[in-house]
Image (cartoon, rainbow, N blue to C red):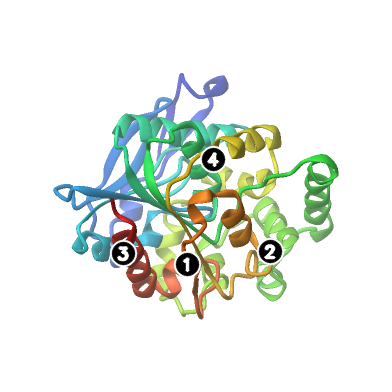
C-alpha cells in the first residue's frame, strides 16, 4: 500500500493508492492504464482507439469505476470512436484522498474539469451515468466547447429553488438518519436513498461488488464482483464512496448557477434511461433534462428495457448500439 502526501489537496490530506496487484487478474478488462496529475494526485483513465478521429467520454458514478464500461469500449472503438473513460478521484485506479472532507461535490467537479482541460479535447461526445452526470454536467457548464453531443443516462442534476431548496437536503438527511445502520440485505430488500446513504456511512466492510449486483438485472460472476471490490482493499480507501450519498443535494447555489449556463448549451442531447432503475425510473429526470436542454427537443428519448440502475452491465450491447446509432444520426 502506497501512501503519498499531496501538497495541492486541502490541509495536506493523506492520499492512498490501491496497489497495482489488486487489479492483476481483472476479467474482461485488457486495457492499458493512462494517468494525468490532478491536484497532485494521479487520475487514471482508459484511452482506446487513439487513432480514431471522433471521441466519446464515458463517465461513471458511485461506487463503480471504468470497469463498468468494459463491454462498451470495444464496440465504440470498432464504430470509429476514440474512447476515454476516467476513474473519478477516490475510485478505480485513481488516487484516493483518505479524508471524507476532501470529497466535496465542488472538488470532484474541479478535478474532472482539470482532467478535461489537460486533455484539451473539444467537440467530443459523452455518455454520463449516475455521479458521472452530476459531475460531468457541471464540468460542461464550465467548458461548453468540450462536447458537441451528450447522452445522459440514469443520472440527475438538482435544480431547486425556494422551499424545495430548503427542504430537500433536510429530508434526505432525515431519511439517512432514520435508516440507521442497514445491512446490504436490508438495502437489497428496500432500495431507497435512506438505506443507500446509511449503508455507505456505517458499514464496516463495503461489499461494492454485491452493491452493484443489487442494482443490476443480470447475474454478475464472482470475478466481476471482485473487480468492483478491487479498488478498495481496506476501509482506509472508503472515503469517496462513503461521502457521495451525503452530498447529492449539496452546493445547490452553484448547481443552480451551472444549470443557467447549461440551458444556453444548445447542442444535441439524448436522454437514455432504463426501465427498472429503482432510484430514477419514477422520478422523471429524463423529462427534466428534456425540458431544460433545448438540444433534447426533437430527439427521441430511449428507454433501455430489462435494465436496472447500472444498465451498462445489464444491456451493454444494446446500450452501445443505441448510442452509436444516435451519434451517427446527429454528427455534423
Q: Are marks 3 and 4 in contact (CB under 8 Å)?
A: no
| Residue 103 position by quadrant | top right
Disc 4 to disc 2, C-alpha distance: 21 Å
Q: CA distance from mark 1 to mark 4?
A: 20 Å
Mark 3 in CB contact with mark 2 (< 8 angstroms): no
Does 89 sit above or below residue 9?
A: below
Label 3, label 4: how many angstroms apart (C-alpha)?
Answer: 24 Å
Residue 1 appears at what percent x and percent y? 40, 41
Name the residue that disc number 3 marks.
324
Who comes first in sequence, dot 1 or dot 2? 2
Label located before the other in sequence (4 or 2): 4
- Mark number for residue 232? none
Q: Please indicate, yes or no, whether residue 42 appears anywhere in the rendered image.
A: no
Mark 1–mark 3 CB contact (< 8 Å): no
Q: Earlier in the sequence, mark 3 or mark 4?
A: 4
Residue 262 numbered mark, or none: 4
Q: Residues within 10 Å of mark 2 (few under 14, many from 20)?
A: few
Name above or below for residue 28 compared with residue 169. Answer: below
Left of 323 or right of it: where is 261? right
Circle 1 sits on which residue?
300
Residue at the front extreme, as displayed? 298
How far apart marks 1 and 3 lie (CA) works out to 14 Å
Location of mark 2 (residue): 283
Amino acid at each position: 500500500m502506497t501512501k503519498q502526501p499531496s501538497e495541492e489537496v486541502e490541509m495536506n490530506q493523506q492520499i492512498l493508492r490501491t496497489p497495482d496487484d489488486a487489479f492483476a487478474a481483472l476479467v474482461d478488462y485488457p486495457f492499458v492504464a493512462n494517468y494525468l496529475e490532478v491536484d497532485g494526485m494521479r487520475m487514471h483513465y482508459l484511452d482506446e482507439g487513439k487513432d480514431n478521429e471522433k471521441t466519446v467520454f464515458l463517465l461513471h458514478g458511485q461506487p463503480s469505476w471504468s470497469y463498468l464500461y468494459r463491454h462498451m469500449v470495444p464496440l465504440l472503438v470498432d464504430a470509429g470512436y476514440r474512447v476515454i473513460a476516467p476513474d473519478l478521484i477516490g475510485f478505480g485506479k485513481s488516487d484516493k484522498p483518505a479524508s471524507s472532507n476532501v470529497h466535496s461535490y465542488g472538488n470532484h467537479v474541479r478535478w474532472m474539469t482539470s482532467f478535461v482541460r489537460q486533455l484539451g479535447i473539444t467537440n467530443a461526445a459523452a455518455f454520463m451515468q449516475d455521479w458521472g452526470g452530476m459531475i460531468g454536467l457541471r464540468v460542461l457548464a464550465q467548458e461548453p466547447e468540450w462536447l458537441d453531443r451528450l447522452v445522459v443516462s440514469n443520472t440527475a442534476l438538482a435544480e431547486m429553488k425556494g422551499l424545495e431548496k430548503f427542504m430537500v437536503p433536510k429530508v434526505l438527511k432525515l431519511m439517512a438518519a432514520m435508516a440507521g445502520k442497514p445491512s446490504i440485505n436490508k438495502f437489497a430488500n428496500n432500495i431507497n436513498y435512506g438505506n443507500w446513504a446509511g449503508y455507505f456511512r456505517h458499514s464496516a466492510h463495503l461489499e461494492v461488488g454485491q452493491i452493484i449486483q443489487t442494482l443490476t438485472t443480470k447475474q454478475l460472476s464472482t470475478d466481476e464482483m471482485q473487480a468492483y471490490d478491487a479498488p478498495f482493499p481496506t476501509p482506509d480507501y472508503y472515503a469517496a464512496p462513503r461521502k457521495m450519498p451525503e452530498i447529492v443535494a449539496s452546493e445547490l447555489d452553484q448547481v443552480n448557477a451551472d444549470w443557467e449556463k447549461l440551458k444556453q448549451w444548445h447542442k444535441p442531447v439524448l436522454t437514455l434511461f432504463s426501465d427498472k432503475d429503482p432510484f430514477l425510473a419514477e422520478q422523471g429526470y429524463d423529462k427534466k433534462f428534456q425540458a431544460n436542454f433545448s438540444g433534447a427537443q426533437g430527439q427521441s428519448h430511449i428507454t433501455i428495457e430489462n435494465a436496472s440502475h447500472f444498465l451498462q452491465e445489464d444491456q451493454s450491447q444494446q446500450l452501445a448500439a443505441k448510442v452509436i446509432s444516435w451519434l451517427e444520426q446527429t454528427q455534423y
